Image: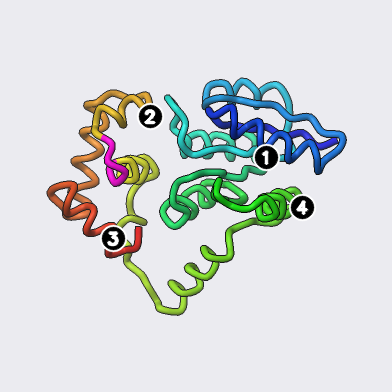
Amino acid sequence: MKKFLLVDDHVVVRSGIKILLSDIYRPSEIYEAVDGETAVIKLKERAYDLIIMDIRMPNTDTLGLMEYIHISYPLSKVLMFSMSAENIHAKRFMKSGAYGFISKDAPLDEITRAVSMILNGKKYISESFAEKLAEDTFSGKTGNPFNELSPREFEIVSLLLEGKTVTDISHQLNIQTSTVGTHKARLFEKLGVENILELKEMASSYNL
């Protein structure tokens, strides 16, 4: 019997995936968590064949949660499921231990294929992202300064690029505004930019 854990703050999303999984995998047990805190509780209760997790949830550092799962539950397989841009986030999450990354806009057959591949021990990325990785390899693109950022700095950059303020980010990641400010100043220095406009221009030049 397959055991799944759905980690997403939207009940409609969890319900839809739950219906899909329960229809394909019979019998199966499907558990749910609404944020990082409840996910950690669920992880301590039992082992799961697959964890499907959104990358944007209130009061949750999802990249940190992914790293925690990878270190504390190394046999766990995680599929990131998100509306956020794959080309910005997929590499980071897969480097942190995720088995795959798929858009919430993906058709059902693609979601089904992703789940099946990961359950069989394989990694999953979309065809479009695979093509992009191949293009980057053959074009010899190197020296991307965004790759030099720490996971926390990259998370903050991503939120800044989405238009979030320092206060917004402190609430979302559940950290002090002063801490966010320190990270922001440090990453601006690393990237050699002085404001959000320059950050956006740099991100655009690296196709972020």
Q: Is residue 154 magenta?
A: no
Foreground label between 3 and 4? 3
Disc 1 marks which amino acid? Answer: Ser
User: What residue lies at 37% left-to-right and 72% top-to-bottom?
Assistant: 141
First of labels 4, 1 by sequence position: 1
Q: Which residue is mark 1?
A: 76
Label 3 CA crowd tier, 10 Å (few <14, some 14–19, many 20+): few
Please tell me which of labels 1 and 2 falls first in the chain.
1
Identify the secondary structure beneath mark 2. Answer: helix
Check the image and report above or below for 207 versus 136.
above
Circle nearer the N terminus (3, 2): 2
* Type of amino acid under label 3: Ser
> Which residue is disc 4 drawn over?
120
Task: Name the side, left or right, on which 184 lies relative to 18.
Answer: left
Image quadrant containing the N terminus: top right
The amino acid type, in three-letter code, at marker 4 is Asn
Numbered badge on residue 173: 2
Task: Write down the region rendered in magenta.
Answer: 160-164
Instruction: Specify the quadrant of the image occupied by residue 146.
Output: bottom left
Give the Cα separation between the discs numbered 4 and 1: 12 Å
Dot 1 lies on which element? loop
How far is mark 3 from mark 4, CA to CA?
Answer: 36 Å
Amino acid type of the residue tagged 2 in the rendering: Leu
Q: Secondary structure at mark 4?
A: loop
Q: Position of residue 86 (x, y in %)?
A: 47, 54
Please rate how many residues cluster around mark 2, counting C-alpha atoms within 10 Å: few if below 14, some from 14 to 19, many from 20: many
Marks 1,2: beta carbons within 8 A: no
Q: CA distance from mark 3 to mark 2?
A: 25 Å
Dominant secondary structure (helix, strand or loop) of the stretch shown in magenta: loop
Q: How is the image coloured?
A: rainbow
The Cα–Cα distance between marks 1 and 3, rounded to whole angstroms, is: 34 Å
Callout 2 touching callout 4 (CB < 8 Å)? no
